[in-house]
Amino acid sequence: MEKTEKRKRFEKVAGNRVQRILDTLQLLKNCSNRNNYEYSEADVEQMISEISKTLKDVRAAYTGELNKVNKQGFTFK
């Protein structure tokens, strides 16, 4: 089965964006070194909370789009 242009574009764009996010999270993880940085538990909780909220929003957007495709609704034939 041959991939469509939309699928190829999605794989390229989404793949690059996911990799960029993973790389950035790795950089954020590097900030956990207490020999170089000072932070509190509240700082960590605030960062993780914001990341989690955004990830939840992304999941909801994809789930909503997938549900649109699966629910055709009523139409006359």
Image: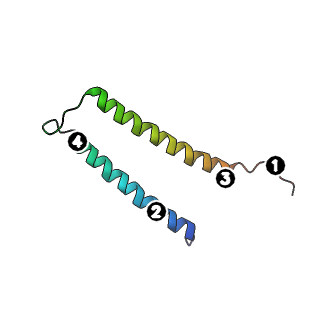
* 4 and 3 marks in contact (CB < 8 Å): no
> Judging from the image, what secondary structure is the residue with disc 1 in?
loop
Residue labelled with disc 4: 31
37 or 9: nearer the eye? 37
> Judging from the image, what secondary structure is the residue with disc 3 in?
helix
Residue 19: mark in rendering: none
Between disc 1 and disc 2, the foreground one is 2
Residue labelled with disc 3: 69
Between disc 3 and disc 2, the foreground one is 2
Residue labelled with disc 2: 13
Distance from label 4 to label 3 (Cα)? 41 Å
Q: Establish if 61 lies above or below 45.
A: below
Judged from this view, the residue extending furthest toward the bottom is: 2
At x 37%, y 51%, the residue is 21
Residue 61 percent across, percent down from the top left: 56, 46
Residue 71 percent across, percent down from the top left: 71, 48
Distance from label 1 to label 2 (Cα)? 34 Å
Distance from label 4 to label 1 (Cα)? 53 Å
Chain-order first, disc 4 or disc 3: 4
